[in-house]
Amino acid sequence: MKSITKNRLTFLSGGLLVAALISYLVSPGSQTQNILLIISSVIAGFPIAVKAFQSLRMKAFSIDLLVTVAVLGAMIIGEYTESAVVTFLFLFGDYLEGRTLRKTRSSLRSLINMAPIEATILKDGKRITIPADEVEKGDTVIVQPGGRIPVDGTVISGSALINEAAITGESVPVSKNTGDPVFSSTISDNGYLEIAAEKVGEDTTFSKIIELVEEAQETKAETQKFMERFAKYYTPGIIILALFVWAITQDVYLALTFLVIACPGALVISVPVSIVAGIGNGAKNGILIKGGDKMENLAKVNAIVFDKTGTLTKGKPEVTAINAIGISEDELLTLAAEVEVVSEHHLGKTIVKKAEERGLSLRQQPNETNIMKGHGLTARLADQEVYIGNSSGAKKLGIFIDKEISTYMLEQEKQGSTAVLVARQNNVVGVISIADQIRDEAYDSLVQLRDSGIKRTVTLTGDNKRVADQVAAQLGIDQVFAELLPQDKVDKVKTCKKSGTKLAMIGDGINDAPAIATADVGIAMGGTATDVTMQTADVVLMSDKLDKLPYAINLAKATIRNMKQNTYLSLTTVAILLAGVLTDYVHLASGMLIHELSVLLVILNAVRLVRFPKYQLNPTFIPLLPTIRPSRPSKKELYLYCK
């Protein structure tokens, strides 16, 4: 039955109840009063009985069945006032419940409303406005000031300040120029943009966010699954107990009252309403939590493993020094860039970027490129074998590194740079130093995580140990494991997952995906993460802000706390009401009123999660931070150490 029809029946039933009250005041106990009460009971009871019948066809014993049986019994014994009041209150409670629940889902509705409807594209030199879902890959999309970007793509002309709140949850505009990526549903505050469409329709990042939030709100928490199993046996159990009450007391009214008051309405919705509100709040603040079970796991996390590059650091390294041996700096940079041009590794891209900044011409194409996982790569360039990587890779290839070069690399690494070795025909021709800055918000985020109950922090990285130690020392990370391959990260995560430890792994690269999948809770940095990492993770931080991690954990804890409050409130209300029924202090109508009020209290308590304090950016200037040494762990905390 449509909700509009149901609402009309609710208010019609309420009107008949008022008419019956007036009739009672004019002529108590009249036939008119009874007719009005019977009509009111039938009108309000009809949708309840239909729903009960539908549930029975599905072999389920619903709350509606309890109410239907009780109302029929009340009418048979002539308690028309009770039957009319109970059916009206039940429907009215349903109406208020639906209205309040829609508020808890307002975050998702707000997201959907952000989706662009139209797009302006350039076709044959003319501007054409078409529906946003008809834009095709490769189309040139035009965005005017105040316009909403309809596709994911790259800016090919113009510049603008873009509000990316729809993707990241942050409303501070970000400057976008030629070559920068832009996302669907973000808004141009000012400026003019021409964009090459790369992802359209359901493939855009924004469409995937909506899809993930919808799926997450449907995914049930373990507690929710338990409550549903509980309700499945609870309803028939109450019917049997009501029969016992009738058999012992021979009081039909008491048995019917027991039946209705024992309805677990508030108990059934106590968990899902909190989960929906919590997930909605997260989505509004740029945090995707993929379901109630993920929310429960996130709330229990007490140890976190961090990837370094792109997670603790900005992931945008820069060349800090070039030490050429036997050739010029430009020759060394050209040689390395011509090989790295085929690489997806961030260090390789940094070298290519530096060469382009210097205006160097990259003419030669590398052949026979071979990626050595965790060690670098080899390639043939103009019939010469070139190796770019680290000292361990050079050792595997039999490349000799003399003491002077080795000392230089060691000094660079002590300063926090990654020393990239370049060799040609097995002879070292130089070292390129690359450094990645620590994120501005990283220090504050670690402090907030400890305040949120995180007992142990670990860094896993493929980078060299000295650089990893330098970053960890600045941030107070407890343990560091460096020079790891993707499989090594998986093994480390497994050893960290011990009894008493609830471990989260956060990363951004595709090489982090296996470790993210292995952890109790996988978290992806959405701003820089690959599609594979985002799909693998349980939680996605849509912006490039690490300080959303403590916010996500605090939100998860608040959601679980809210869920427990609702459960305790529901159970306590039912217990008190049943005790009142059996001691003759609570009657059918008054009990039903209290019962419906408890349902509303549960929903209103969950709505508080929608107003959970909004995420706020609180950066700290890292370069001025002193080096921090982690304190010696207590005996109780030793079990959290990884081997």
Image (spheres, helix red, strand yellow):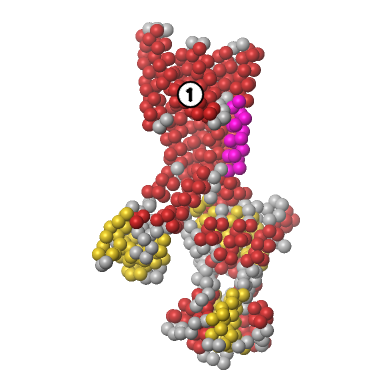
Please name whichever residue, 444 or 160, is drawn nearer the observer in this view of the structure: 160
| Residue 512 location (% of width, % of height) | 59, 63
Instruction: Tell me the crowding category of disc 1: few under 14, some 14 to 19, or many 20 or more residues within 10 angstroms, Cα based.
Output: many
Does 554 appear above or below 236? below
x and y percentages locating residue 77 in the rendered image: 51, 11
Tell me which residue sits at (44%, 25%) in the image. Answer: 47
Q: Nearer the viewer, residue 197 or 86?
A: 197
Residue 425, by quadrant, is: bottom right
Residue 48 vs residue 583, the one in the foreground: 48
> Image height check: is 523 above or below 61?
below
For the stretch drawn in magenta, the main secondary structure is: helix
Q: Residue 222 in magenta? A: yes
Magenta stretch: give its range. Answer: 221-236
Residue at 57 percent of width and 30 percent of height: 59
Residue sitting farthest toward the right: 635
Q: Which residue is mark 1?
A: 49
Dividing the image into 4 quarters, which one contains the C terminus?
A: bottom right
When the figure is inspected, residue 452 is found, relative to residue 510, above or below; the finding is above
Q: Could you tell me which residue is drawn at 46 percent across and 33 percent down? A: 97
Please tell me which residue is depicted at 55% across the width and 60% down the height of the picture. 533
